[in-house]
Image: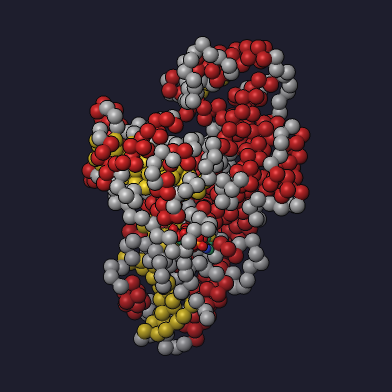
Amino acid sequence: MSPISTRKHGDVLIVTSNNPPVNALSHAVREGLVAAIGEADSDDGVKAVVILCQGQTFFAGADITEFGKPMLLPMLPTVVDIIENCTKPVVAAIHGTAFGGGLEVALASHYRVAVPSAKLGVPEVKLGLLPGAGGTQRLPRVAGVQKALEMAATGNPIGAKEAFEIGLVDRLIEGDLEQHAVAFAEEVKDVRPIPKSSARDDKLAEARANPQIFADFRKANARKFKGFDAPESNIRAIEAAVAKPYAEGVQDERRLFMELMTGTQARAQQYFFFAERKAAKIDGLPDDTRPRDIGRVGVIGAGTMGGGISMNFLSAGVPVTIVEMAQEALDRGTGVMRKNYEASAAKGRMSGAQVESAMGLLKPTLELEALADCDLIIEAVFENMEVKKEIFGKLDSIAKPGAILASNTSYLNIDEIAASTSRPEDVLGLHFFSPANVMKLLEVVRGAKTAPDVLVTAMQLAKKIRKVAVVAGVCHGFIGNRMLMPRQVEAMKLLLEGATPEQIDRVHVEFGMPMGPFQMSDLAGVDIGWHRDPTRIENIRDALAAEGRWGQKKGAGFYDYDEKRTPSPSPRVAEIIADFRARTGTAQHQIGDQEIVERTLYTMVNEGAKILEEGMAQRASDIDVVWVYGYGWPVYRGGPMFWADTEGLGKIVEGLERRGFEVAKLLADKAAAGEKFTR
Ligand code: 3HC
């Protein structure tokens, strides 16, 4: 059965798509749309057409699962042209998300009506692509060049109300969408000539008069777009819309689209789209597992972590009880939260009323007993097993039956923490990344006894607070920090053997990481995990910490910083490194960039393979999600495991062996069998 059905309401042909979950424009949908337009053209009784979708959304785009396979005709560019050339006016009736190819269908329709909650966007850039069905040519003609640039090159959608204000939507519909869309079609059925987006020119005039618009846009977004291919191609396609007639512009669009589609970045970004969605699925849980209700959350610790964690829940409308040991620390913590919210309000990201309503949900207290009515309690105190065990022991007698007890530890053994309670099945790790109110990643650490419904609750809650959750097993550092360790160890060894912090960081930044290992140390604090004894200097890090070079917060770490926190290479650090080279008698050699890649990145892949082998991650793609969302691994390289696949596992194994590393069995086996981690 075709997902596209048609029926007549008077002289309006209603074309309905029913292709759950998101009405992707799969082959059958494209075929059905062409047939429906044919029906409208050939039926004299039809005076206008309404295209709408059943279910949660209007067409959310091309069917991404079809990418990389031979394309079945009709292709989407043909379909949209057929829609635009329909001899009867076509009205797109939009709810949910008109995304990508979906918005292109709407742009080719002669009119667009939408419910106020609808979102319109061209997110192709996030898949390493550009709108390839005329979108780069029609959108600037309808929405204006500046708006089209913003939408296409960033991929961020706009709301229906804004779309209405800029003329992308012709009417906002309150009430029943189908009924009003049909009424709208009745109104416009006799209007001639039928308005075609591709024939419009009025909104291009401004950009023609001010060609600087493109250079300005590139400059304003240079940082955001760095490393990515697709934003620039989107800009070029829109430049073509301004500079060339429509028929030539679409040819440029097609060429640019195909260039992107056959590149590695698009493959990586499309892989990542599905990786992110797969991460939410936990293998092997009983099908009937139901989440527990979470009405109130308790957070222990009002420091940076506890405060950030609390903000996630407050922003999502979940009341939070936050506990500290001293009034001063409690006031300071809640003060920082308010300040952060007010900073968001100052940037226009939330209203004053939203700030007050979030803060109104917060109950600060000095009493651990106040957590008795919480359904989930997250401990976010400093990393010390004894302290954590003591807290969980107390929670065991305070928390109500069925409450979930979570630790935000980034390294410690969750099973050991769980054993300090009489209800280990209610215990798990919820490892937030700093700043916890901003970073998207949440590692959900599954203890040996964690109950299925506790896990399911955590995954559902993560979605509610707009985090991407990944399940990790109990091991030192879980997925993310465990893989960081070999990188840190090798980075320090490289310093001793002749590299500089600047060189190592540069290699990582050129690779696409937001910062290198030493820049990250300076940001997080060189003193983190330091033994705090300035007379005990066993390595370079100890030496820096002993001198108070604790990183950015002290104006000195692996780099020197000025008042604006601009880093510069530090002569003092060079002295410390030279001293350690001499003291340890380490042989020096010329270190090339490739050696840095092999020793700091190949070793991460090797650790990832061990994590998989031990079942600490469910799948290779979960590891990639951790690294993209937790550490800023460039999404256009997919994540460490996808990247290893694109490098070739044989090459990774050869590099590791040549440098004397023990290769993980899974990695060696896969390389030998010519297999990949991610497919
Ligand atoms: N193709 C195929 N499958 C898709 C899809 C698409 N375009 N969009 C979503 N899905 C699938 C997801 O993989 C997921 O499958 P699963 O249940 O098996 O995991 C399911 O639909 C539901 O998706 P979400 O979990 O993301 O559901 P949400 O309700 O959270 O979000 C959404 C819905 C906002 C539509 C979101 O899915 C989304 O942003 N989708 C991608 C939209 C997009 O990128 N469109 C452009 C495609 S490229 C294009 O159109 C090229 C053209 O210009 C030629």
From the viewer's perspective, tell me whether residue 508 is left or right of residue 9: right
Q: Position of residue 342 (x, y in %)?
A: 29, 37
Which residue is depicted at the point 75% across and 52% down? 674
Q: Nearer the viewer, residue 597 or 101?
A: 597
Residue located 55% across and 27% down the image: 518
Say which residue appears at 63% left-offset and 14% top-offset.
580
**Residue 466 visible, this orientation:** no
| Label total for image | 0
Task: Judge from the rendering whether residue 570 lies leftward or rightward of residue 8; answer left or right.
Answer: right
Q: Position of residue 351 (x, y in %)?
A: 27, 45
* Residue found at the very far front of the displayed protein: 422
Quadrant for the C terminus in the image = bottom right
Horizontally, residue 342 falls left or right of residue 249, namely left
Residue 286 relative to residue 615: left or right: left
Residue 411 position, x and y percent, is 50, 35
In-front residue for pair 176/163: 176
Picture quarter containing residue 398? top left
Display colour scheme: secondary structure
Residue in the picture at 35% in, 75% down: 178
Vertical arrangement, residue 545 with respect to residue 155, above or below = above
Q: Is residue 365 above or below residue 533?
A: below
Q: Is residue 526 visible?
A: yes
- Taking depth in this image into account, of 408 and 347 the one nearest to the observer is 408
> In the displayed structure, would residue 212 be above or below residue 36?
above
The percent coordinates of residue 621 (x first, y second) are 58, 50
